[in-house]
């Protein structure tokens, strides 16, 4: 009715030869749900049938879920820095947890700042940037620092295997800080807001330690746990850079030695189910709130996670398990319930898409594609692959069919997902016909490859006890010299890569 009246008023003014700017549409709120270290083990993506995530699956049914969504970097700090700043790791030089994002990004470049400057209330609690909420000036108000950070409550039973940390805590859900983070967002959804809001819910779990109450372990009985698909000879066809990446922490050897691989899988599933419960509490509050019909919801995991696939654990790699994560959007007037999009997207899309959907200007520095066309029609044509970077000049390009990885020293991997969804067979140097495929995919590697920012000793470990993986791939002295000489040069085809076969089609 209001719109009809406005239209009539605008028409009257036009007829009187007086042109005034139309009153802008009311802007949508944004509920921004960031989940730490949640890989594609959510029920509706079907990757692991053992996982129990009824609430994330319910959110997926409310709008559009992306089955091929990938991080810009497979580590907390660079992934979040990229998607929140709109600048890839290869632009900021933030490749790792040890490089302070504040040195690569200005507060004015932040997605949250952009919404604040556009007149939004910017509210949040938990982990958004690496270590917490990031720049204080982005926020109009926050829920403050959650008790205990992301670690959870006091352990009743420590089940950790070396660096893979998990166990059962004393007490119930209230002992884990994500419960307080959910409480904060539930309270904000219950308030009257005079301005549109951008509300961040920054969940920590299922980041390690997987310390959650007993009941979540009981949801996943050990005798029912199955190991993720893996092959004992899976590394035989990998180049040296990839093997280095797989073995960088030595986790898999320790897990095998312990004989408790299934317990670790159980721990991750338990932490996911705890996290899902908190997502459900927020959704329940959302459904009954005054904002259920005028709020965009965007849920993302910051990267994937390995649990022994390719003899690798954690993130820190360029394979499917380390790079794929849930990505769900609910956009009033744009998405329809039950949408499933198989197109390849990466999380650089978040910044420009949220701005475009909210009528907020997109700053010039922002990279990434506006995926509104896919939100409106998940089957729409889409020509862009997803791009992930891990360390200086190590990149992966993922199209709907292929994953092509090229490391700084020219090492390569190529996987065909039409018949190899677990990336068991590296085709990179198998046949000449793949050279054309690689050449096509290589066009999407980042054109700017800035050197890594200086790491701060002891930095990057705010709320994250994992060691840097910056030097996971060995560099030759020649490469290091070239890097120092030409920090801004676009990536060149590696000299050690096979020559393209021009006759191959
Ligand atoms: Ca993370």
Image (cartoon, helix red, strand yellow):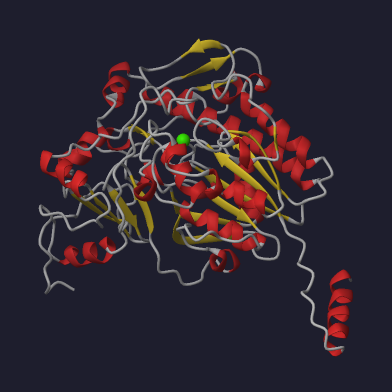
- The residue under the point 35% across, 23% down is 457
Q: Along the horizontal axis of the image, is 144 left or right of 37?
A: right
Q: Is there any visible trace of residue 232 in the rendered image?
A: no
Q: Along the horizontal axis of the image, is 187 left or right of 247?
A: right
**253 w.r.t. 280: above or below:** above
Q: Nearer the viewer, residue 57 or 174?
A: 174
Q: Nearer the viewer, residue 38 or 101?
A: 101
- The residue under the point 57% across, 20% down is 152
The x, y position of residue 44, in whole percent, is 54, 48
Q: Is there any visible trace of residue 78 in the rendered image?
A: yes
Q: Along the horizontal axis of the image, is 438 left or right of 41?
A: left
Q: How many marks?
A: 0
Q: Nearer the viewer, residue 79 or 339?
A: 79
The x, y position of residue 120, in whole percent, is 71, 50
The x, y position of residue 359, in whole percent, is 66, 63
Question: Where does the C terminus fall, quadrant-wise?
Answer: bottom left
Q: Quadrant of residue 133?
A: top right
Q: Along the horizontal axis of the image, is 172 left or right of 204?
A: right
The x, y position of residue 410, in whole percent, is 16, 50
Q: Quadrant of residue 451?
A: top left
Question: Where does the N terminus fall, quadrant-wise?
Answer: bottom right
- The residue under the point 32% across, 43% down is 390
């Amino acid at each position: 009715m209001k719109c009809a009246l406005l239209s009539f008023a605008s028409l009257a003014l036009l007829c009187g030869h007086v042109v005034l700017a139309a009153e802008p549409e009311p802007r949508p709120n944004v509920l921004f749900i960031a989940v730490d270290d949640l890989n594609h083990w959510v029920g509706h993506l079907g990757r692991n049938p053992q996982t129990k995530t009824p609430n994330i699956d319910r959110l997926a049914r409310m709008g559009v879920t992306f089955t091929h969504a990938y991080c810009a970097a497979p580590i907390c700090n660079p992934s979040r820095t990229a998607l929140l700043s709109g600048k890839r790791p290869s632009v900021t030089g933030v490749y790792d947890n040890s490089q302070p994002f504040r040195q690569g990004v200005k507060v004015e470049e932040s997605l949250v700042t952009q919404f604040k400057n556009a007149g939004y209330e910017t509210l949040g609690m938990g982990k958004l940037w690496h270590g917490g909420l990031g720049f204080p000036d982005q926020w109009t108000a926050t829920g403050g620092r959650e008790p205990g950070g992301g670690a959870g409550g006091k352990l009743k039973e420590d089940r950790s295997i070396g660096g893979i940390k998990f166990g059962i805590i004393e007490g119930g859900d209230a002992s884990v800080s994500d419960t307080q983070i959910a409480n904060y967002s539930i309270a904000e959804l219950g308030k009257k807001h005079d301005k549109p809001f951008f509300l961040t819910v920054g969940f920590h779990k299922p980041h390690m330690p997987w310390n959650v109450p007993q009941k979540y372990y009981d949801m996943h009985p050990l005798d029912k746990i199955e190991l993720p698909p893996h092959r004992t000879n899976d590394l035989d066809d990998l180049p040296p850079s990839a093997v280095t990446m797989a073995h960088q922490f030595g986790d898999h050897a320790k897990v095998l030695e312990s004989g408790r691989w299934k317990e670790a899988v159980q721990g991750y599933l338990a932490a996911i189910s705890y996290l899902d419960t908190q997502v459900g509490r927020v959704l329940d509050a959302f459904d009954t709130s005054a904002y259920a019909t005028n709020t965009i919801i965007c849920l993302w995991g910051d990267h994937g996670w390995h649990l022994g696939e390719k003899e690798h654990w954690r993130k820190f790699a360029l394979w499917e398990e380390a790079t794929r994560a849930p990505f769900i959007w609910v956009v009033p007037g744009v998405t329809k319930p039950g949408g499933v999009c198989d197109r390849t997207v990466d999380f650089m899309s978040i910044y420009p898409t949220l701005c475009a959907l909210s009528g907020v200007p997109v700053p010039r520095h922002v990279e990434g594609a506006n995926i509104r066309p896919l939100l409106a029609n998940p089957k729409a044509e889409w020509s862009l692959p997803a791009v992930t970077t891990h360390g200086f000049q190590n990149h992966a390009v993922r199209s709907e069919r292929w994953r092509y990885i090229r490391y700084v020293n020219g090492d390569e991997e190529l996987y065909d997902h039409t018949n190899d969804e677990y990336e068991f067979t590296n085709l990179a140097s198998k046949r000449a016909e793949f050279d054309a495929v690689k050449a096509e995919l290589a066009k999407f590697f980042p054109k700017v490859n800035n050197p890594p920012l200086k790491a701060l000793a002891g930095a990057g470990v705010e709320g994250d006890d994992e060691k840097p993986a910056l030097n996971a791939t060995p560099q030759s002295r020649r490469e290091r010299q070239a890097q120092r000489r030409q920090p801004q040069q676009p990536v060149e085809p590696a000299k050690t890569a096979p020559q393209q076969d021009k006759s191959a089609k």
